[in-house]
């Protein structure tokens, strides 16, 4: 099953998908992924389900081969999620899928008698003109709207906790010695803790989901500059090229989703 999941959901660049029946909007989306400039194994995975309005990035952790297994499993479980008639049911289905992945990874780690096998995850779902973002770890979601970039997620990491407590300035976070230490991930603990945000969608919105392999070498200001020009493929290529030009010491994955107006409206994903 895992091999099938890797084959089905393996990161492939330049795959443009279009959602056909998502209320007032249509969505164009694509994902790019690269092992980076240092590592030979890509432990990231992404999901591009524009057909139902669900996208995700997972960044594996837990050793040479375990991270790849973990991220593939997270994406496999999310890939089983179906379209739902209500926003609440859709979000509940996504969370259930992540809980199942958490249980499986916990069992796998126990069977191997190894440390945690896990993956960070960030997922975006859209329903009838609204979005919800669900995440655990330091993979991020951004919303680019009207020339402004806004980070939708807040890292579950040791450094973010230090920033929140005032012990470290935000501009020092990326260079901090513990910048790669996360406090939440799918599979890391027996009980999975997820955070979520939600809001309305506007025509022209662009969402970016990415692993920390991008954000550790490209800052938010630069991301905004690279997202400003259409089309989506060009923006995705620019993000990847910028990360690789700076050595990309980690795997780099980005999923871009663009919203265009159709007709209609709908209920919220709150």
Image (spheres, helix red, strand yellow):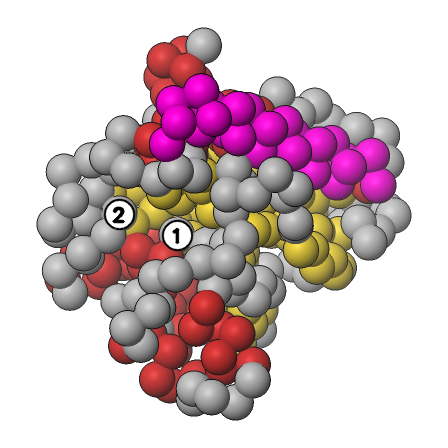
Q: Identify the residue at image location x=70%, y=51%.
A: 132
Q: Picture coordinates of residue 27 (x, y %)?
A: 59, 43
| Front-most of residues 231 and 270 | 270
**Residues rendered magenta in the picture:** 88-114
User: Earlier along the polypeptide chain: callout 1 or callout 2?
Assistant: 1
Q: Which mark is residue 211?
A: 1
Q: Which mark is residue 251?
A: 2
Find numbered disc 2 in the image and state the secondary structure of the residue it sits on: loop
Identify whether 42 is placed above or below 200.
Answer: above
In front of the other: 90 or 77: 77
Residue 58 among those drawn in magenta: no
One can see residue 186 in this view: yes
Q: Quick check: marks 1 and 2 in contact, CB under 8 Å? A: yes
Residue drawn at point x = 14 percent, y = 38 percent: 40
The answer to whether residue 32 is visible is no
> In which quadrant of the rendered view does residue 228 lie?
bottom left
The percent position of residue 146, horizontal first and vertical second, equals 57, 73
SS class of the residue under badge 1?
A: loop
Which residue is farthest front?
113
Along the line of sight, the residue nearer the viewer: 192 or 43: 192
Circle 2 Cα neighbour tier, 10 Å, few/some/many (<14 / 14–19 / ≥20) = many
Tell me if 167 is positioned left or right of 96 in this view: left
Q: Quadrant of the C terminus?
A: bottom right
Magenta stretch secondary structure, dominant: helix
Residue that appears at 53% across and 53% down:
184
Task: Tell me which corner region of the image, top left, top right, bottom left or bottom right, holds residue 173.
Answer: bottom left
> Relative to 251, does residue 75 appear above or below in the rendering?
above
- Whole-number angstrom distance, CA of label 1 to CA of label 2: 8 Å
User: Is residue 93 shown above or below 229?
Assistant: above
Is residue 96 within the magenta segment? yes
Q: Residue at x 61, y 38 (%)?
A: 190
């Amino acid at each position: 099953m895992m091999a099938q999941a890797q084959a089905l959901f393996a990161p492939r660049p330049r795959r443009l998908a279009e959602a056909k029946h998502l209320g007032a909007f249509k969505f164009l989306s694509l994902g790019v992924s690269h092992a980076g400039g240092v590592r030979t194994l890509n432990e990231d995975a992404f999901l591009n389900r524009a057909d139902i309005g669900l996208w995700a990035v997972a960044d594996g952790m837990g050793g040479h081969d375990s991270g790849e297994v973990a991220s593939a499993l997270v994406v496999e479980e999310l890939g089983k999620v179906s379209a739902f008639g209500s926003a609440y049911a859709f979000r509940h289905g996504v969370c259930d899928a992540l809980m199942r992945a958490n249980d499986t990874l916990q069992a796998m780690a126990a069977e191997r008698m190894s440390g945690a096998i896990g993956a960070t995850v960030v997922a975006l779902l859209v329903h009838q003109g609204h979005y919800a973002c669900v995440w655990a770890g330091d993979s991020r979601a951004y919303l680019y709207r009207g020339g402004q970039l806004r980070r939708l997620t807040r890292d579950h990491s040791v450094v973010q906790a230090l920033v929140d407590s005032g012990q470290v300035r935000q501009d020092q976070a990326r260079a901090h010695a513990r910048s790669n230490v996360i406090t939440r991930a799918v599979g890391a603990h027996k009980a999975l803790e997820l955070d979520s945000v939600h809001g309305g969608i506007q025509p022209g919105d662009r969402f970016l989901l990415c692993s920390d392999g991008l954000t550790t070498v490209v800052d938010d200001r630069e991301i905004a500059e690279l997202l400003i020009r259409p089309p989506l493929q060009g923006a995705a290529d620019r993000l990847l090229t910028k990360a690789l030009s700076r050595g990309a010491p980690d795997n780099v994955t980005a999923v871009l989703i663009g919203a265009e107006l159709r007709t209609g409206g709908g209920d919220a994903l709150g």
